[in-house]
Amino acid sequence: MNTQDRQPLLEVRDLKKYFKSAGGTLKAVDGVSFTIYKGETLGMVGESGCGKTTCGRTAMGVYPKTGGLSLFDGEDVHAMDRAARLKFTSRAQIIYQDPYASLDPRMTVADIIAEGIDIHGLASGRNDRTKRVYELLDQVGLNTEHANRFAHEFSGGQRQRIGIARALAVDPEFIMCDEPISALDVSIQAQIVNLLIRLQKERGLTYLFIAHDLAMVKHISDRIAVMYLGSLVELTESTRLYENPVHPYTRALLSAIPIPDPDVELSRTRIELKGEVTSPIDPPPGCRFAGRCSKACDKCRTETPALREIEPGHFAACHLV
Ligand SMILES: Nc1ncnc2c1ncn2[C@@H]1O[C@H](COP(=O)(O)OP(=O)(O)OP(=O)(O)O)[C@@H](O)[C@H]1O
Ligand SMILES: [Mg+2]
């Protein structure tokens, strides 16, 4: 994408989401900033529990925020009245992590897919509704005979196709894809990613694509944000992140991806993450990665590093960069 004419669609500024927990304040998202431009895919990666889902859901106004700001096409998602919220949900949709839990097993596929069509009154009648459902089934690679069957009759990959059709039904501009492939067999994962890429091209969609490993994310993302315990540690173009990862955590994540060439694979070193994972409950000051970082110095244990631009479009939060 030409960097000059990029238009922001989702702008997240210093977003915070804290949960009260028995032991104190759980800082699930603690000052995250990024922009997603129209037509691009921003990948978001990080280990389980680092706050990806909470960040995405708070950015979309599904959760109230603790602090900061999230603007969708310039509008504060947390300050929308009912009508604005309804309009927003026809423009921004979510595909969920677990296609087994996110589809009501007692509903027919047609009723699941048509949920948004019904809420937003998009169909002119019964026939138009059915026609739209058939078109959506076709677009995601399912058959019209699937329409009257129940979600529990389908495999994981098929269920995720149903989830994608449900999201597409309102003809959105933006979709948060929350680990849409991690519950699926490896053989099915590429099919779903390729389907999402094709739909993006056909419909000019903008994606936030959340995942916990970097391998598949690289394939779909224009830029990648790396998250660690509630904060972004690095953000840049996908190719750049692979060529020149600067944050020790990004380097460790990348070193864990197997390389198809056996000679290269055998000769290279994996960076193992050692040490204690800092608790997100009332975390101490300093870099949250410091306890696992082989390069950490005194400053890392006392001062929280800010996300800084270290080269054009490449941001990192590390005192040592
Ligand atoms: N509703 C909630 N109430 C309290 N704590 C929560 C809630 N949702 C998430 N958390 C906590 O916030 C942190 C971030 O969770 P989140 O689900 O956002 O992580 P994630 O990166 O999406 O993980 P995964 O890859 O497993 O989906 C975790 O410590 C989690 O236990
Ligand atoms: Mg999650």
Image: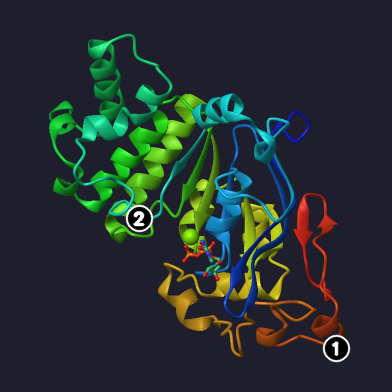
Q: Is residue 101 above or below residue 276?
A: above
> x and y percent of residue 103 in the render?
29, 46
The quadrant of the image that shows the N terminus is top right
The quadrant of the image that shows the C terminus is bottom right
Residues 101 and 288: in front is 101
Q: Is residue 113 among the parts visible in the rendering?
A: yes
Q: Amino acid at mark 2?
A: Asp
Mark 1 or 2, nearer chain start: 2
Query: Which residue is label 1 attached to?
Result: 298
Left/right of residue 299 with respect to residue 121 in the rendered view: right
> x and y percent of residue 104 in the render?
26, 45
Which tag is nearer the camera, tag 1 or tag 2? 2
Mark number displayed over residue 156: none
Q: Is residue 255 above or below residue 275?
A: above
Spatial separation of the CA atoms under disc 1 and disc 2: 41 Å
Q: Residue at horizontal 29%, vertical 39%?
A: 162
Q: Residue at horizontal 51%, vertical 82%?
A: 267
Q: Residue at horizontal 41%, vertical 75%?
A: 262
The secondary structure type at the circle numbered 1 is helix
Mark number displayed over residue 98: 2
> x and y percent of residue 35 in the render?
71, 44
Q: Amino acid at mark 1?
A: Asp
Q: Quadrant of residue 282?
A: bottom right
